[in-house]
Amino acid sequence: MSNNTTIEKIKGSQQEPEKDEGSIRYLGYFNRIKNLVKASNRALAYASEVGESFRPIAHPKLVTFMYGVSWAYIIGDVSYAAWVTNMQSQGKYIPGLKPWDPEPKSNEVAAKTFLSEHSLVDSDWRLTAIKRGVFQSIASMALPAFTIHTAVNYSSKLLKNSTIKPLKMYAPIAIGLGI
């Protein structure tokens, strides 16, 4: 068994065969999959934009379903933010804690510190829910839906007399997805 230097490893030295690290190497793959799933949850908020883009060729129920997916994400996000704020104001929140985990004991020092360091809007779970709900409704639903719907609608009207059928059918979708 020889000690390979970094240079030998880079050059591809075959002096020592690679060791199988067993099942521990799969933890790296699992971590990447976990990060991908976490990142894809945020994409659910934009499902309505995809549905709106495909409105010219999609069944209306599909578009409605995509709006439902976006609203479900927003409700979940607002609920989770309000829950975290409530737990922090009671001194019960620990980073990484999930709603289905057992509730930890209250920490009075942590609660007082949280309440003293945050404004009323950021320390009351009801106001946090309103603030987050208004923001998500405008930023994730109203503005994108209005913008994409308008672009798809007017591009469809502009291209309705086109003799090129694929252009007439798919250009509004491409414009909607491009926004």
Image (spheres, helix red, strand yellow):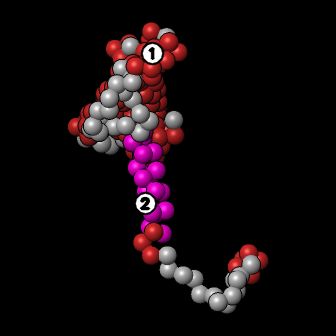
CA separation, marks 2 and 1? Answer: 38 Å
Q: Secondary structure at mark 1?
A: helix
Q: Residue furthest left?
A: 61
The mark nearer the N terminus, 2 or 1, is 2
Q: Residue furthest right?
A: 7
Q: Is residue 108 above or below residue 26?
A: above
Percent of width and height locating residue 83: 33, 25
Percent of width and height locating residue 34: 42, 53
Percent of width and height locating residue 71: 31, 29
Q: Is residue 6 above or below residue 61?
A: below
Q: Quadrant of residue 4?
A: bottom right
Structural crowding at the residue carrying mark 1, measured as other residues with C-alpha within 10 Å and reported as few (<14), some (14–19) or many (≥20): some
Is 171 positioned to the left or the right of 75 in the image? right
Q: Is residue 152 above or below residue 27?
A: above
Is 15 positioned to the left or the right of 146 in the image? right
Q: Could you tell me if residue 55 is visible in this image?
A: no
Inspect the image, locate mark 1, and give the three-letter code of the amino acid beneath it. Answer: Lys
Percent of width and height locating residue 91: 39, 23
The label number, if any, that marks residue 18 in the structure image: none
The label number, if any, that marks residue 30 in the structure image: 2
Q: Is mark 2 in CB contact (under 8 Å) with mark 1?
A: no
Q: Secondary structure at mark 2?
A: helix
**Residue pictured at 41% horizontal, 39% vertical:** 96
Inspect the image, locate mark 2, and give the three-letter code of the amino acid beneath it. Answer: Phe
Q: Main secondary structure of the magenta part?
A: helix
Which region shows up in magenta? 25-43
Q: Who is closer to the viewer here, 47 or 75?
A: 75
**Residue pictured at 47% horizontal, 57% vertical:** 32
Q: Is 23 in the magenta?
A: no
Q: Is residue 154 above or below residue 19?
A: above
What residue is disc 1 on?
112
